[in-house]
Amino acid sequence: MLILALFSPSLAATLEVGSAYATVQDAIDAANDGDTVHIPTGTWAEHIDITGKAITLAGDGSGATILSPGTNHDAIS
């Protein structure tokens, strides 16, 4: 049984911003490759950095989930 556990593929997780993670970047930092970071409806005044992460960012739809860094910089790098 232990051998099977060592070779089992890891399952992707969905990390929930707003409940489990206070900020989008907190969830991104905790995410592993293949995970999804769910960003709920609202305007999130953050610059986020996903460099080196093979993750999915998912919102609640165009116009419902907005990333706005509040500066002249891009919201995502």
Image (cartoon, rainbow, N blue to C red):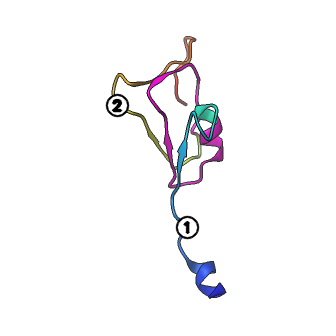
Query: Which residues are drawn in magenta?
Result: 26-50
* Residue shown at 38% from the left, 24% from the top: 64
Residue position marked by numbered label 2 in the rendering: 61
- Quarter of the image with the N terminus is bottom right
Identity of the residue furthest to the front in this view = 19
* Residue shown at 58% from the left, 24% from the top: 47
- Please tell me how crowded label 1 is: few (under 14), some (14-19), or many (20+) other residues with Cα within 10 Å: few
Above or below, 19 against 2 in this view is above
- Please tell me how crowded label 2 is: few (under 14), some (14-19), or many (20+) other residues with Cα within 10 Å: few
Q: Does the magenta stretch include residue 32?
A: yes
Q: Is residue 12 magenta?
A: no
* Residue shown at 63% from the left, 38% from the top: 21
Residue type pointed to by label 2: Gly
- Quarter of the image with the C terminus is top right
Residue 26 in which image quadrant = top right
Above or below, 76 against 70 in this view is below
Q: Mark 1 to mark 2: distance in Å?
A: 28 Å
- Mark 2 residue element: loop
- Mark 1 residue element: loop
Seen from the viewer's position, the closer of residues 15 and 48 is 15
Where residue 5 sits: x, y (%)? 61, 79
Residue 7 in which image quadrant = bottom right
Query: Is residue 50 found left or right of 38 in the rendered image?
Result: right
**Which label belongs to residue 10?**
1
Where residue 60 sits: x, y (%)? 38, 33
Seen from the viewer's position, the closer of residues 50 and 57 is 57
